[in-house]
Amino acid sequence: MNALTKERASAIAEQSYKYGFVTDIESEVAPAGLSEDTIRFISAKKEEPSWLLEWRLKAFHHWQKMAEPDWAMVKYPPIDYQAASYYAAPKQKNKPKSLDEVDPELLRTYEKLGIPLREQEVLAGVTPRIAVDAVFDSVSVATTYKKTLEDAGIIFCPISEAVKTHPELVQRYLGSVVPVTDNYFAALNSAVFTDGSFVYIPKGVRCPMELSTYFRINAENTGQFERTLIIADDAAYVSYLEGCTAPKRDENQLHAAVVELVAHDDAQIKYSTVQNWYPGDKDGKGGIYNFVTKRGACRGKRSKISWTQVETGSAITWKYPSCVLQGDDSVGEFYSVAITNNYQQADTGTKMIHIGKNTRSTIIAKGISAGRAQSTYRGLVRMLRTAKGARNRTQCDSLLIGDQCGAHTVPYIESRQPSARVEHEATTSKVSEDQLFYCQQRGLNAEEAMALIVNGFCKEVLAELPMEFAVEAQKLVGISLEGSVG
Amino acid sequence: MLSIKNLHAEIDGKPILKGLDLEIKAGEVHAIMGPNGAGKSTLSYVLSGRDGYTVTEGQVLLNGQDVLSMKPEERAAAGVFLAFQYPVEIPGVTNMNFLKTALNSIRKARGESELDAMQMLKLLRAKAKLLGMSEEMLKRAVNVGFSGGEKKRNDILQMAVLEPKLCVLDETDSGLDIDALKVVAEGVNTLRAADRSMLVITHYQRLLDYIKPDYVHVLAYGRIQRSGGPELALELEAKGYAAFAPEAA
Ligand SMILES: Nc1ncnc2c1ncn2[C@@H]1O[C@H](COP(=O)(O)OP(=O)(O)OP(=O)(O)O)[C@@H](O)[C@H]1O
Ligand SMILES: [Mg+2]
């Protein structure tokens, strides 16, 4: 099969990023700069207890001694951490108690983004399908279906609220999976995190609907540092989705999140992300730096954590959702699609740390590169001495569109347990002119053809997404490749 | 229906078609035979608009429409269908989804309403049955892991679903066993219609026992060298193409 001709592949048009608008809303923004005072300011704004302020300061002092990591296959100019603001919140007179009190401008923003903030009437016997926590810059502006969930004993609220209403849970779990000293961006996040979601599913409860958080960066010259903590107690189940967008801006903005998951005995957490931060323009100007630490702890026996991610946005993605498989017979899964176009760079993958007996993990990573983009899969599978009978299967596929992009696979395998088995398979292929022409001959235009072929390539991963998100993700795959065919 | 006049085409600056003329009326079936490398597949790609095949002279009209100015997908919507000499694999895309996407794109381009999931399923089942294909085949990825014969049959299934005006079949018989050849030929025959024309490219007269052509042409050295009725195919089978070598012509 012949590869795409150079002319066709290089005829790159600007991506149509339809979430690039700015909401005109009055915001309270902290002055630029990062110091102890900034942290005290954030903590005071959130009316936090003193233990949390201490925790933040400890993280900050640690961060000051750390160096920014440089091992990832991404390039960017040095970040001036003093130039950005670490807190921006839409001005609201009083904290809205119900959706009716939320600023209509904000409601319109979410409507434009296609995020349902209005609760549908709950008909008898019909459960709603999705509950949303909407985080706008540094604060959560609305959380839906709280009442329905409370009735089931489930806590789903902004983490800033959980700090006040459920301090014992937050204090017990916060930083227990990703310690404040874990890495440079996690330490920074721990010092300055502003909001994010908190989820607790009690023993034996199956969460009756999808939970989701929608992150929106709006303010200029600010970073977003969200913190999410999800706990599934014994035999609990939850499926959680995360979505993200940002306006088109010429400056790069930093998004450094930390997500911690804890699954106890027989519990299951399914965490899905559709990441669509602004990727920058076709010449590589602007876009979000997405430097994120996500980790799940399978603490309990037979517990299971699945990460599914569709990464289409951001100028740079640095992200390795991981599982620490501590409980015997626990299961970790990582399903990933990472699409990079134009000048986007992604260094993403996972870590599976096998500690317990008969722990199992599956990794399926699909990387798609177009334009001049660079995409790297970086994955670690570690079998500890205790991980008798543990197994891992890794499948890593790269798809190239044109001949100016790159795909790299960097697997690290460490095993100290002779009975553990690790399988790794990697492939690289190109979208061929033959395939495109075949589709076009059957009536699809070049872009529809590309979207169909790439969706086919990602199928195994997209199939892991909850139904509500799968269709949206398929469209997004098409949109993010616009301009990659001439 | 199809009118090709003085068609010249080249690949990478190398002339392949050198003044080809061909007229096909509505409802007719024409067979093209010719030696390897004569330009038969090239003709099929030029008709369907493949990148890299440059037309330097000549004209192609389909029902009066200038085909050469259209994009490949516009030609498909106008009714040009090519059954490929080598059908292509598309991993992860089910036959069902592929057929659905293709048919709805074409219907949309023609200003017709798209079919919903139920209508589509009914249609696809009926067409698969016509070609002796199991429903299980519809659920598999397009041509992935298909045997050579299954791929050819699958292409004809697409043809049956898309109901084109001009069907170009490039060596559809190659790779088919005798039973499959009969089934596929029957499928093609059921698609013969007063408003549909076919251009059947083949090396073997055997196919023409099943799909009976109205005319047979010899394509060699970039032009139609001779035209005749079905008996021409028998003659070629006996004598080969020696008579059409440039010295002899
Ligand atoms: N991409 C290409 N680059 C260069 N030459 C090509 C290319 N494709 C085809 N050709 C040449 O064009 C000529 C015609 O090829 P074509 O495939 O049309 O022949 P054909 O009549 O279909 O032959 P066959 O009976 O073997 O299928 C051949 O000499 C072939 O080598
Ligand atoms: Mg050929």
Image (cartoon, coloured by chain):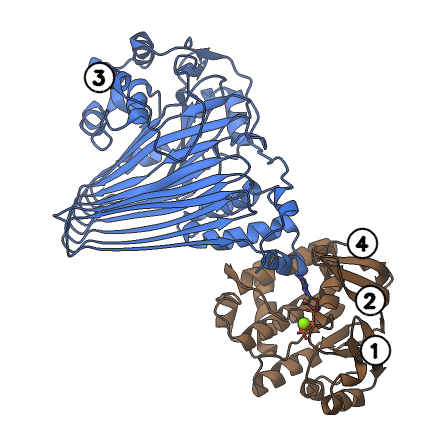
Chain colours: A blue, B brown
Task: Check disc 2 and report the residue beneath it.
Answer: B18
Residue displayed at 73% across by 72% down: B40
Q: Disc 1 on helix, strand or loop? A: strand
Q: Is residue A323 left or right of residue A348?
A: left
Q: Amino acid at mark 1?
A: Gln
**Ligand 1: quadrant of the figure:** bottom right
Whether residue A479 is visible: yes
Please identify, in this view, whether the residue under mark 1 or under mark 4 is nearer the observer: 1
Q: Which residue is mark 1?
A: B225
Q: Position of residue A181 (x, y in %)?
A: 23, 25
- The answer as to whether callout 1 falls within 8 Å of ligand 1 is no
- Sequence-first tag of 4 and 2: 2
Q: Which amino acid type corresponds to the residue marked 4 in the rendered image?
A: Ser
* Tag 1 near tag 4, CB within 8 Å: no
**Residue with the mark numbered 4:** B69
- Parent chain of label 2: B
Badge nearest the viewer, 1 or 3:
1
Dot 1 and dot 4 within a common chain: yes
Q: Bin the neighbour count of mark 2 within 10 Å (Cα to Cα): few under 14, some 14-19, many 20 and up.
A: many
Indicate left or right for A182 with A29 as reference.
left
Residue A36 occupies quadrant:
top left
Q: Secondary structure at mark 3?
A: helix
